[in-house]
Image (cartoon, helix red, strand yellow):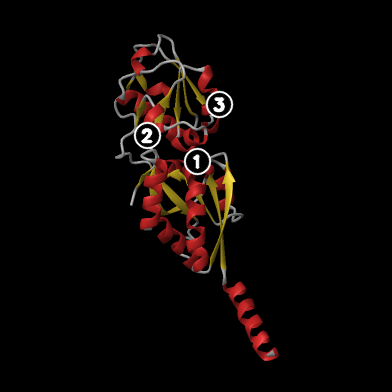
């Protein structure tokens, strides 16, 4: 009996040692929710997933680059490209998971046609999401951008501004908090959902499901192909995750696989 107990203890100790741990940074909604959803599946495969929730778009990348975290899940490829370029990091995409259609919200008007002359409009202050906001405003006919202005467009690229809107650039996470103080706010869907906004119902204009801004799982070149990382990528691409996204977010988040 003692030999059996000892043998079982040895097996348990070996299993504990064999378990791999992944620590992943994420913004709360929907990224951390998706990671928590796949956590039991990964545990069955010998991967312990630790999810660290962040409220900003900078530290998750810095801490992965500095090897304080294994990976992150909060951003799209254009943002990552600009971050790598600006910070000198070499982070890479492991898997594209979903699209969060970007939207414009207001507590003062019910349509963009009602925007008053000189309206105050707030957009994210990072290069790609700010450009994304301006592209959406241009697509909706609020402004016209100069030829060639793309995903990194800035207010300086506005060619025509018939309503003479005043654009302010703020940190993306703060935009829902100033919604009642401005005429229009261009808000990333993860922050809109955290603020209990329903993008498919509350947004005055929203990107289509063909948006190129696919949210990605990000790691470093040295760990992107690890067994644990690939198991996480596969779990995020499972049919169960697809159904979870469709049922929970009802169009506010769209599977990209």
Q: Earlier in the sequence, mark 1 or mark 3?
A: 1
Q: Quadrant of the N terminus?
A: bottom right
What residue sits 47% from the left and 38% below the top? 190
Which x, y percent locates residue 8? 63, 83
- Return the residue at label 3: 177
In the orientation shown, which residue stands out farthest toward the front? 1
Q: How far apart are the alpha carbons under marks 1 and 3?
A: 28 Å
Corner quadrant of residue 104? top left
In this picture, is 196 found above or below 69? above
Secondary structure beneath label 3: helix
Q: Nearer the viewer, mark 2 or mark 3?
A: 3
Secondary structure beneath label 2: loop
Q: Earlier in the sequence, mark 1 or mark 2?
A: 1
- Return the residue at label 2: 151
Disc sitting over residue 86 in the figure = 1
Which x, y percent locates residue 36? 52, 53
What residue sits 33% from the left and 14% below the top? 113
Q: Nearer the viewer, mark 1 or mark 2?
A: 2
């Amino acid at each position: 009996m003692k030999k059996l107990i000892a043998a079982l203890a040895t097996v348990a100790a070996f299993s504990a040692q064999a378990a791999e741990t992944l620590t992943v940074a994420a913004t709360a909604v929907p990224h951390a929710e998706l990671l928590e959803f796949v956590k039991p599946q990964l545990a069955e495969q010998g991967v312990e997933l630790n999810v660290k929730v962040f409220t900003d778009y900078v530290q998750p990348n810095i801490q992965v680059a500095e090897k304080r975290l294994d990976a992150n899940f909060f951003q799209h490829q254009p943002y990552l490209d600009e971050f790598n370029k600006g910070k000198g990091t070499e982070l890479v995409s492991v898997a594209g998971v979903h699209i969060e259609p970007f939207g414009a919200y207001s507590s003062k008007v019910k349509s963009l046609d009602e925007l008053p002359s000189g309206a105050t409009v707030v957009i994210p202050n990072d290069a790609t999401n700010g450009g994304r906001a301006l592209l959406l405003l241009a697509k909706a006919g609020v402004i016209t951008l100069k030829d060639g202005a793309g995903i990194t467009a800035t207010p300086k690229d506005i060619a025509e501004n018939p309503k003479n809107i005043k654009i302010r650039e703020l940190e993306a996470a703060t935009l829902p908090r100033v919604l009642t103080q401005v005429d229009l706010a261009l808000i990333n869907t993860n922050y809109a959902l955290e603020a209990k906004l329903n993008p498919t119902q509350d947004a005055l204009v929203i990107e289509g499901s063909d948006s190129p801004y696919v949210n990605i799982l990000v790691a470093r070149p040295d760990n992107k192909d690890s067994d644990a990382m690939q198991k996480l990528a596969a779990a995020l691409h499972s049919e169960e995750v697809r159904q979870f996204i469709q049922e929970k977010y009802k169009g506010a988040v769209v599977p990209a696989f």
